[in-house]
């Protein structure tokens, strides 16, 4: 199986887009070597704005650039991109519906060494709650590339959440990414796992393990949290014995809440795999945190059996 780093893919794709479209501008909050916007800076310094550790100012500046016809990409760690700039995103970008793309890098617990202050467990719920905001969570490098290309074409506010680590390629290379569409990654007849981000690969591993026990699990990549095709989610859940949601995010306000709301009244048992109202913490490696917070294929296996 091929692995790619979503941050590297994003940086390379942004550079390619910049070569084709002179209206693309990039803003950075002192993290360019981590978010990989340094690639864009090296080739297009005149369209790159280093704003320092000042996400709120960066966001307002991006709003101004968008009013001149620029396609502005702002970049920081997800926890700061969504949290530190909330007021500016809400008031200055989403109320007027400006064409600004907010990229939250090192999302979830993937910045394992820096602890709770740098780990984003609530960013998608914050962004989903803002009217006019589109919220996306790629599952791998392939989808990160396709998603970045799509949001450059799309007019309006977008928040995209990117993992820090290498992820296995799962998104079909010959499939176009569409905002709002959930993607079937594995067919199954007994249970369905709605997942996004790193948890899509965990769901795939769980499905393979459960297949050995004659339990058939469908895996759906819900990379578009908002908007989301509610009718397609209902269709994918139809006839299932149970539903599991899996996300590297708080179970409050994220994927679990969205799927539960869509499928309310359907009478299908639902359980969740996610972060249970806790902040992150420092660890020796990413795997340690995934184990501690039950963000593993084994946790999904247990959830299926519980349902």
Image (tube, rainbow, N blue to C red):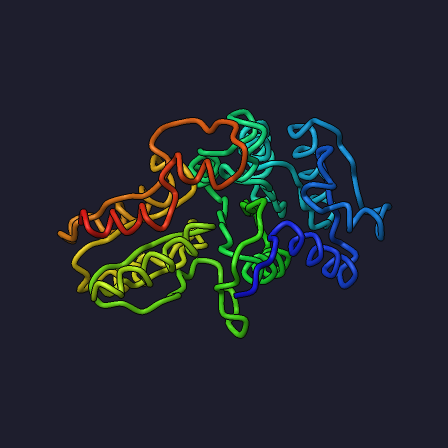
Report the front residue among 2 and 267.
Answer: 2
Q: List x then y, in percent, for residue 25.
A: 75, 48
Q: List x then y, in percent, for residue 143.
A: 54, 60
| Quadrant position of residue 153 | bottom right
Does 116 sit left or right of 102 as displayed?
left
Question: Would you place residue 223 above or below residue 177 in this image?
Answer: above
| Quadrant position of residue 23 | bottom right
Question: Would you place residue 19 above or below residue 163 in this image?
Answer: below
Q: List x then y, in percent, for residue 151.
A: 59, 56
Q: Residue at x 31, y 69 (%)?
A: 187
Does 36 sit left or right of 253 as displayed?
right
Does 171 sit left or right of 50 as displayed?
left
Instruction: Identify the residue at the far left of this view.
Output: 267
Report the front residue among 85 and 138.
Answer: 138
Report the front residue among 160 and 99.
Answer: 160
Q: Residue at x 52, y 59 (%)?
A: 168
Q: Residue at x 61, y 36 (%)?
A: 77
Q: How many marks?
A: 0
Q: Residue at x 54, y 27 (%)?
A: 115
Q: List x then y, in percent, for residue 248.
A: 43, 42
Question: Would you place residue 181 above or below residue 69 in this image?
Answer: below
């Amino acid at each position: 199986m091929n692995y790619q780093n979503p941050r590297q893919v994003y940086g390379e794709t942004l550079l390619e887009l910049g070569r084709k479209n002179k209206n693309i501008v990039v803003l950075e909050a002192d993290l360019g070597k981590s978010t990989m916007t340094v690639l864009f800076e090296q080739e297009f310094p005149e369209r790159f704005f280093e704003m320092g550790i000042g996400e709120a100012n960066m966001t307002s500046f991006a709003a101004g650039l968008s009013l001149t016809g620029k396609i502005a990409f702002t970049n920081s760690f997800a926890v700061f991109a969504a949290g530190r700039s909330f007021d500016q995103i809400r008031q200055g970008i989403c109320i007027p519906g400006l064409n600004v793309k907010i990229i939250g890098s090192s999302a979830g617990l993937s910045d394992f060494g820096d602890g709770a202050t740098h780990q984003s467990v609530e960013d998608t719920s914050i962004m989903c709650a803002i009217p006019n905001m589109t919220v996306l969570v790629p599952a791998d490098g392939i989808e990160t590339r396709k998603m970045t290309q799509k949001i450059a074409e799309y007019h309006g506010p977008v928040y995209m959440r990117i993992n820090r680590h290498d992820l296995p390629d799962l998104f079909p290379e010959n499939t176009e990414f569409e905002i709002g569409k959930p993607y079937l990654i594995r067919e199954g007849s007994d249970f369905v796992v709605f997942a996004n981000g790193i948890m899509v690969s965990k769901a795939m591993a769980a499905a393979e393990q459960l297949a050995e026990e004659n339990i058939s699990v469908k895996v759906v990549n819900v990379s578009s949290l908002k908007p989301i095709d509610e009718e397609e989610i209902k269709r994918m859940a139809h006839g299932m014995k149970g539903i599991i949601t899996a996300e590297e995010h708080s179970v409050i306000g994220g994927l679990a809440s969205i799927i539960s709301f869509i499928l309310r009244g359907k009478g299908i048992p639902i359980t969740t795999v996610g972060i249970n109202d806790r902040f992150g913490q420092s660890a020796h490696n990413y795997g340690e945190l995934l184990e501690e917070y039950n963000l593993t294929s084994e946790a999904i296996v247990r959830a299926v059996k519980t349902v």
